[in-house]
Image (cartoon, rainbow, N blue to C red):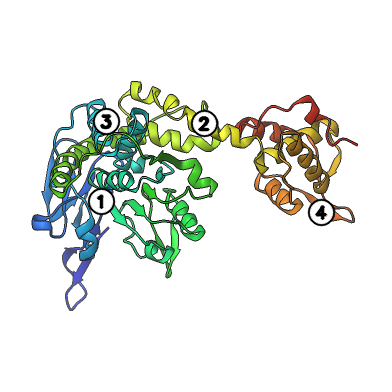
Amino acid sequence: MGQQLKRNGDGAKAATIQRLIGTYGEVFPDGCIVELIGGPQGGNPRLLLWDGAKETMGPLIEFGGVKYEAAQFPESLLRELKLPRQSRPHGTTRQLLVEICKLVEDFAGLPATSASLVGRFVLCSWLVEAVQVAPALVLVGPNLMKANQLVTLLHCLCRHGLRMTGLTPAGLRALPSGARFTFLISQPTISDRLEALLDDASHRDQKIPHRGGLLDLFGAQVIHTESIPAGDSLSYRSIVILMIPGGAQLPVLDPDFQHRITEDFQAKLLNFRRANLRLARNLQFDSSKFVLPLRSLAHAVVAATPDDAGLQAEVLDLLREKDDEILAERWTALRSIAIAALLVAGHDSPGEVVYVSELATIGQEVLKRRGDNSAIDPGAFGRQLKSLGFRTEPRDAKGIKLRMSEDVCRRAEQLARDFAVPQMEDAERTGPQA
């Protein structure tokens, strides 16, 4: 791998030339890592190799018979990128989290619960390869000064923090692939197309086609905007922090103090990463206490403290409000209504054929009895059934149909449990009234 053979004029092997591999960092199965660290006088980064016992630093690193060099960054991007210059003992994970939370409380004026979630987000950004779906931190509210100061602080703390505004889908695709940035995006609105691309980038094993190749834009995201984007995926993987006016005057986070925070905490967090990344990747976590859409976020927050069971146990309370909000939304969400309609049809017409239009009518009645008079679009209702994995039978004169077989009824019951669909009331089970 990474080698070329040089041959003489007769075609005989003359020498082996080892090719340099440019890298933004490597994680090996045995827990060894190659990490970017800051270069001299702000120049191009160097590399640090941690083999589990000792560290080696330099512009070139050799490991496993391969030579690595730091990948080149555009100069304007390099100026904005925060990188550690060395590794420094971080104490325990609990001590490090307390220090980060204290900074968040002091400079962003957040209450303890919000600060604890922000602190865990920072830690997760350093262990992001351990999660399937990267978390997002969404900052909304009228206090722009508080939000800007929190973004500035996160720029100092998060791994490979990259602060941007005016971001478009094309701009996101133009960034270096595989750098594991923590994207810090501050702009009034997030377009639907950008939100969809950010969602794609949040999945570790999904690569994005671009100009005949595949982009790896996986990384944690901070989004400071005027209102919460409407997409379900962002909602489920995000920690929303409200930027509300009030409280004491915040201390100024001036450039000198930013530099001091960066120098101190980037070094500690690099040490935290190399001590905990393998633990986080092997972490076994029972997420069944959370509603299904919240489980990826819960896993990311738990994985941020892989060596401290006490901190992991706190996550249920930290995410309880979001869990309750999702449960409340489930009451009238189309997916919940579709599952409820299937439960009604399975109860009333087991084994029989039911038309999708009839299921939509049942769903409309369920929605009405739950206090929502919105009209259900039969086409959208049918697409929702397909997205839930139900196979319809060929259309006839009356429309598309679905047989309420034992398998269909069993799947509807399982989906009701997975998506925490509210229990059916007797009135709802009776179906539409005459």
The residue that mark 1 highlights is 25
Q: How far is mark 2 from mark 4, CA to CA? A: 39 Å
What type is the residue that disc 3 sits on? Leu
Q: How far is mark 3 from mark 4, CA to CA? A: 57 Å
Q: Earlier in the sequence, mark 2 or mark 4?
A: 2
Between marks 2 and 4 in the image, the one whose residue lies nearer the viewer: 2
Q: How far is mark 4 from mark 1, CA to CA? A: 52 Å
The residue that mark 4 highlights is 394
The quarter holding residue 338 reads: top right
**Pointer 2 with pointer 3, Cβ within 8 A:** no
> Which is nearer the eye, 9 or 207?
207
Q: Measured from the top left, where is residue 73 in percent x and y? A: 23, 62
Residue 379 vertical placement versus 433 (above, below): below
The residue that mark 2 highlights is 323
Q: Measured from the top left, where is residue 129 in percent x and y? A: 35, 43
**Pointer 3 with pointer 4, Cβ within 8 A:** no
Identity of the residue drawn at 25% across and 38% down:
249
